[in-house]
Amino acid sequence: MVNDEKVARNAEDYRDRLLPISRALDRAQRDNSTIAVAFEIWNELKQKLSEQPKQVQDKFERRMNMCGGNHFLANMLDHRFRGERLTEEQKASAYKLIGDINDKFPAILMSYVAGDKPFPKHMFGVQFREVAPITWWRSLAVEEDLLNFKELKPSWILMCEQFLSATASTAG
């Protein structure tokens, strides 16, 4: 029991400030958290910290700025997120990175993010939200071979495996 009301209020204030951070860290540090998922967790945390003091927000922003093209591209490749929360600058970074991997990949990524052909519309349904991202990509069958996807699919899947299996780290 705390007799000093001011100390008790301070303790409650710190608990309230740290609770969303500790929950986000707990989720991000799970064994199966990938960089795509971790980036989504950090975006959720950013919203939750929007009413925190500027000092807290600034420290968070410095940490968030450590994310780069790999995180953004992984987030875009995950069918549950498709880069919906990315800024235009972050998307540009992901498109540059994927273009450096293969100059035909940016057009495929753009069609996928838009939910456009050659990707079947039904594959973006909520019933597939629980499917692991790499399973989603492996099971994808396209009817129309727009963008030469059938030929590029083996190298695309290999790239997806690398980005979608990258484990998140919250060290530092």
Image: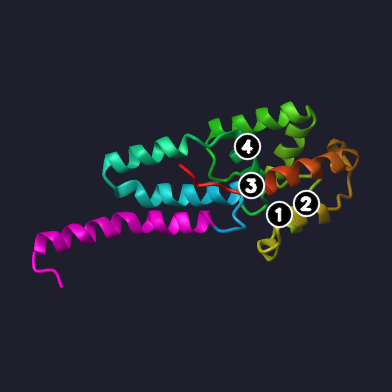
Mark 1 sits on what residue? Answer: 133
Residue 99's disc is: none
Going by the numbered disc 2, the residue's amino acid type is: Trp
Callout 4 touching callout 2 (CB < 8 Å)? no
- The C terminus: image quadrant: top left
Is label 4 in a helix, a strand or a loop? helix
Task: Write down the region rendered in magenta.
Answer: 1-29
Residue 38 colored in magenta in the image:
no
State the residue in front, 16 or 32: 32
Q: Residue at x 23, y 57 (%)?
A: 13
Callout 1 touching callout 2 (CB < 8 Å)? yes
Residue 82's disc is: 3
Going by the numbered disc 4, the residue's amino acid type is: Asn
Vertical arrangement, residue 60 with respect to residue 40, above or below: above
Say few, some or many: other residues with alpha carbon within 10 Å of mark 1 (under 14 / 14 to 19 / 20 or more). many
Identify the mark nearer the N-term, 4 or 3. 4
Mark 2 sits on what residue? Answer: 137
Q: CA distance from mark 4 to mark 3?
A: 14 Å
Mark 4 sits on what residue? Answer: 70
Tag in front: 4 or 3: 4
- What's the magenta bit mostly, secondary-structure-wise? helix
Q: Residue at x 34, y 47 (%)?
A: 50
Going by the numbered disc 3, the residue's amino acid type is: Arg
**Quarter location, residue 131:** bottom right
Vertical arrangement, residue 42 with respect to residue 106, above or below: below
State the residue in front, 98 or 142: 98
Tag in front: 3 or 2: 2
Q: CA distance from mark 1 to mark 2?
A: 6 Å
Say few, some or many: other residues with alpha carbon within 10 Å of mark 3 (under 14 / 14 to 19 / 20 or more). many
